[in-house]
Image: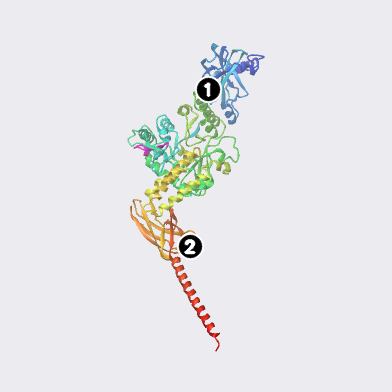
Amino acid sequence: MKRVAAWACIALLAVVGVAPGVNAEEAQQDPIVVTLTGISPVSLGESDTLTVSGRIANTGLSDLTTVSVRLTLSASPLADRRAIRQASRGEAPPDSVPLYDTAIAVTDLLAPGITEEFRISVPTVNLPVVTPGVYVVGAEVVGSGPAGFVILGSDQVLIPYVPADIAPIGITWLWPMATWPGQAPDGVLQGDLIPREISDGGRLHAILDVGTTSPGVSWVVDPQLLQVVDDMSDGYLVEKGGEIRPGTAAQAAADWQERMRATLGPREADGSRDNARVRPLLALPYADIDADAVARAGLDSDVTRAATSAGPLVREEVGRDANGTIAWPAGGHLDPVALDLLASAGVSAVVVRERAVPLAVDPGYTPTGHTDISSAAGTVRALILDSGLLAALTMPQASQSQILAARQRFLAEMAYVALDGGPTGRTLVAAAGSTRWDPNPRLLRALLASLRSTAWTRLVPVDQLLAAPATTEVRTVAPYDEKSRSRELGGAYMERIVTAGTSLDSLRGVVANPLSITTPVNAALLRAESSAWRTRPKAGTSLVEVTQQTIDADIGQLYVVPREAITLSGDRGLVPVTVANDFDQPVVIGVSLQGNPSARLDAAPVSDIRIEPGRKASLEVDVRIVGSEPLPVSVQLIDAEGRAYGEPIVVELRTTAYARAALWFAIAAAALLVILVVFDIVRRARSRQGKVPA
C-alpha cells in the first residue's frame, strides 16, 4: 500500500511541476553541476536502505537560493541492454519521475563557485520498485535563481533491484598482464616504460597489487613480461635518448616478481602462503604476437614458436604449469589462417568479441560466454567478451563519480542477464578490450567488493569455463574483413621483419653453434611482432631497426679482407682471397666471384672453407677473364647452400694477355710488311730486266 500511495503522489506532483512558464533555456541560465559520488548498496534488495550521496557546485555567475535535492527514479525497469547503454551515457529514461518525499534542503544560499555535499537515504520499501530489474536513480537539484524556482541540474546512475531468490549469474573475469616488449637482442630496454609499469604506482604494479586480494579472478599472462622482469631483477640497462645507462628499477622488478610468484605460483606444501588456492592462470603466446599479421607475412614458424614457448616459459618463471595457452587477438577477431596455426601449436582457446561469433538465431536471452569453433587442428574454445561488461570496464575512471558510474554499469549488465529469463548456470566473460588494459585500481577494488557482496553473482575460474560442455546456442564465425586486416601490423613493417629473418638465416648456415647468436635475436624478432606495436608503431620500428643492426654486426664478424686491384699475366689465373673470422667459434664458408658484366668472367665457387675462431684463411680462386679492359669483380661469401652471406666486396681484375698478343700481332704484321716490300722490289727488278733489248 505504501508503494501504491507513493506512485499516486508522484503522478500528482509530476503534473504540478516546479515553475509554470519557465522554459528550459531560461533554467540553463543558472548552471549547477550535480555529481553523484556514492550509492549504497550497489544492488537493491527488499529490505535495504538506499543511500545516495553527491555534491552540487554553482558554476554560474548568480546566487542560488533555497537549494534542495531530491531523488528521481525510473518508473519501470529498463527494457533492454541498449537502454542500459543509453542511461550510462546520461540519457534520462522517459518515465523518470521525481520522488518528492525524498527532498532535503541543502543550503539557503549557494554563491558562485561554492560546492555543497548532500546525502539522502530511503528504505527500499518506500521506493516505487516492484518489478526486479535495472532502474535509473538520480539526484535532482531545485532552487531559485534568475529564472525563478526551477530544476537546476541533475545526475543519474544505474541501480539493480534483484530479489534474494534469483539464481546467481557466473562471471569469468580475465585479468591480462602484458606490456610493450621493447627489449633489444642484447637485453637493453628501449626506454623506461617497462620499469615504470612494474614500479609503485605503475599500471602492472597496480593490477597485481589489487588482484592478489581476489583468488577468483583469472590471470592471462604474457611470458615475455615475466621473462623481462626476471632479467631486470639483477640489474639491467636502458637506452633512452641515444644513451645507454644502468636502470634504476632492479629492486622494483625483484619485488614485483616475488609478489607475482606468491600470487600465481603453486601452493606451498606447509600451507604457509597467503594464497589459499592456486589461481586460474593462462599463458599468452610469447610477446602477445600479432598472429594475423605474422601469418599473412608468411612467417608461420614464428607463430608456432611464440605459442609453443609460452607454456615452458611460464612454468620456469611462475613455478607451475598454466591452465593452457590462449590467444587474445588485438581486434577481437582472428583470421582463420592464424587460428589454424595457433591451434596446431597447442593453443586451446581464443578470446573474441561478440561480433566475431554472432548468434545464428536470437534466443531471447544472453547466452553463456563461450562457444566452440573449428580449426584445422580441431575444436578451439572461444571465450566471448560480453559487450556490456566490456563497455563498463572501458568507461572513464579518473574521478570518484566516473568510478561509481562504471561500477554500477558493470553490475547493471550482470543483473539484467540474471533476470532475463535465460537458463541458469550461465557464465559471462568480462575483460577490457586490450591485454594492455589500464584500469583504475579503485574501480577494480570497488568491483571486486561488489561481486563479493551480491548473492546473485559468482566468480567462475577460467579453467572451469574451458572445461564446460558445449553450448546449445548456434553461432557463426564472421568473416575476417578488410577493416580487421587494416588494423594489423602493416605490410611494410612486416617486410622489414622478413628481411631481418632472412639475414639471420645466413648466420645459421656458417657458424658451428648458431644458437648462441640466433636465440636472442629470434626472441627480439618475436617481440617486434607483438600486437602491442599496433598502437605504438614508431617504438616497434625502432625495435626492428635495433635488431637488424645487431644482425648486421654479427654478420660483419665474418668478412672478405679488401685488397687492391689484381693483375693476371694471362687470360687465366688464380685470384687470391682472404677471409677473416672474428667470431669466437669456427665457421664454414664459401666464396663466389661474379664479374660485371658476368659474361667476361668464368669462375667456379669455392666451398667448405673452415676458419677457426679469430683466424684468417687465404685461398685462390681459378678464373678465366675475357677482354682486355679492367673488370670489376664482386667477391661474395656464400653458405653451404650457395646463399649469399653478408655484403660483397668489389675488386678490379686486370690482364696482360691481350697486350702481349697485340705485340706479337704487330711484329707479325711488320714482318709481313717487310716481306711484301722485298717481294715488290724483287718483282720490279725482274720486270726491268725483262725489258732490256738483246
Residue at the image position 48 percent from the left and 58 percent from the top: 596
Residue 369, image x and y in percent? 52, 37
Residue 539 percent coordinates (x, y):
47, 39
Residue 218 on image: x %, y %: 45, 36
Tell me if 534 is positioned left or right of 91 in this view: left
Q: Is residue 233 left or right of residue 338?
A: left
Instruction: Label 1: state its secondary structure.
Output: loop
Q: What is the span of residues highlighted in magenta in the rendered image?
A: 230-241
Q: Nearer the viewer, mark 2 or mark 1?
A: 2
Res. 132 visible in picture: no
Q: Amino acid at mark 2?
A: Arg
Which one is in front, 363 or 647?
Answer: 647
| Quadrant that contains the C terminus | bottom right
Residue 56 horizontal/vertical position (percent): 53, 17
Picture quadrant of residue 654:
bottom left
Residue 585 visible here: yes
Q: Earlier in the sequence, mark 2 or mark 1?
A: 1
Say left or right for 511 vs 388.
left
Q: Residue furthest bottom?
A: 694
| In-front residue for pair 396/600 | 600
Residue 46 tag number: 1
Do the residues bearing badges 2 and 1 touch, measured as CB atoms within 8 Å? no
Q: Dot 2, how many residues are within 10 Å of its Cα: few (below 14), some (14-19), or many (20+)?
A: some
Relative depth, front residue between 536 and 669:
669
Residue where numbered disc 2 is placed: 600
Q: Residue furthest right?
A: 21
